[in-house]
Structure formats: C-alpha cells, structure tokens
Amino acid sequence: MVTITNFRDIGGIKNKDGKKVLTDVFLRSGELSSLTKEDEQRLEKIYRLSKIIDLRSEAEVEERPDKTIPKTDYIHIDILEDMTDDGATIADFVKIGSPEKSAAYMEKLYANIALNTTAQKGYNRFFEEILALEKEQSILFHCFAGKDRTGIAALLVLESLDVPREAIYTDYLITNELRKQENAMIIEQAKTANLTESNLAALQIALNVDSSYLDSFYQTVEKEYGNIPTYLKQAIGVDKEMLETINHRFLKG
C-alpha cells in the first residue's frame, strides 16, 4: 500500500455507459517531497509510473522538491502561475483571517482557475501528457495537498471519460478522510505560531475540501461555456478526436 498523503487511484469508477475507468493509470496525491524508498519502489514496480505532473508553484517546488523516481519523467505545470491574488499555500490561508472568508476564498479560487487562461493551458498540457502515455504506464498528478489544483485535474479527467458528476464529487470528498492525520499535524504546527482562533479556524476550513468549491467551478464553467464538453473543447483544447482517443484507451467493459 502506498503511504503518500492523499494518494489514490481514480480508476475503477463507472461512467454513464457502465464502462469502468482503467485502474493503475490515473493516480492523484499530495506532494512527493517526503516520498519513502518503499513508496518509490511501489510506484515503479506496481504502477509502472511513467510521469509525475507537479501542479505547484515555482516557490513550492523550490521549497519542497519532489523526490525523483527512476524511469519516471517529471513535468512541472504551475497552474496558478499568473494568478497573483490566488495562492494555495498554508501561509495564504492563514492570512485570510476567518472561516467565512476562507470558504469564500476557496470558492473564488475554483472559479478563477476555471477561467484563467494560464490554468487552462496548464490543464491542456496535462491532457497532452496523458495522451502520450504508452500501454500499461501510469501518470501521477499532484499539488501541495492534492485537493484543489489536483481535484480539478481529476474532475477534468473523469469528465472527459463521461463519469457521472455524483461519482466525481464522491472521489473529490475522499480527500477529507485521507488528509485527516496530515491536517491535524499542520494545525498543531500552526498553534505554535501564536495564531488567533479565527486564523486557526480559517486554516482548518482551507485544509479540507467542500462540495461548494466544486459547485463554484461547475457553475462558472456552465455560465461562461454552457457545459463541460464545450469547456473541454474551447478552454482546455480537448477536442472530439482527443475525447474519442481518451475514451478508447482508458475505459473498459
């Protein structure tokens, strides 16, 4: 079993036609800065990991670089590169000040990612890397916590495979269970910095995911593009031919 924080395989989910997303292909997680030798070996041997997609900022990568894995390509795609008012680090959330502001900030972040052209180009690159996978290879994508930038990446993959929205939300919300231990450690560390109760409450909100964040993404997309297929084509650059290839290669049954 892989012990990376917030790690999971999003395969095995059924799409609207009853076909299953292939397992051992699409892996999502938090950052890999503390990757153990055992996990490295599991990713290499069990999952035949071919690519790591790091969706963090330059500063995050410099501060806590991913551990390298043999025979695995590392691709850095800074999803928030030119979103100067929107960060996704612990420090960003601590500065917010209150749980109400924290939740509103998260909803705004998801809406902004949906429409930001650099983020859209980043997710286009992500899909290009997926399409370049060879048979029986896997791709692991992550950000800091593996919940927001990564959560949207997982949403886009599952939407491209015509997975029901309910199943997408279910996978998304698993993060709250898988990050319990890590989040508790972060809160304890934050308490030593003499933060106010309001700051700590804001941080607690930001460390978890909420269905309202995905709601914000979907509502923004549907307001501006009408629906997800149009968004995938016009914003992300995943056209009909690419969708057909993705569905042919990564669904079974």
Image (cartoon, rainbow, N blue to C red):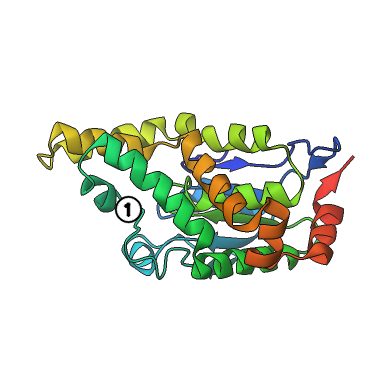
Three-letter amino acid code at the position of disc 1 = Thr
Between residue 125 and residue 219, name the one nearer to us: 219
- Regarding residue 46, the answer to whether it shows in the image is no
Give the structural element (helix, strand or loop) at label 1. loop
The quarter in which the N terminus is drawn is: top right
Asked which quadrant contains residue 197, the reply is top left
**Residue at point 46%, 67% (across, down):** 78
Left or right, 120 with respect to 128, comes to left
**Residue at point 53%, 40% (across, down):** 215
How far across and how far down the image is residue 237, in percent? 68, 68
Left or right, 220 with respect to 185, comes to right
How far across and how far down the image is residue 208, in percent? 40, 36
* Classed neighbour count for the residue bearing mark 1: other residues with Cα under 10 Å, few (<14), some (14–19), many (≥20): some
Between residue 140 and residue 125, name the one nearer to us: 125
**Circle 1 is placed at which residue position?**
89
Q: Is residue 143 above or below residue 186?
A: below
Residue furthest out toward the right = 253
**Residue at point 45%, 37% (across, down):** 209
Left or right, 118 with respect to 163, comes to left
- Regarding residue 93, the answer to whether it shows in the image is yes
How far across and how far down the image is residue 160, in percent? 73, 52
How far across and how far down the image is residue 224, in percent? 58, 57
Between residue 215 and residue 3, name the one nearer to us: 215
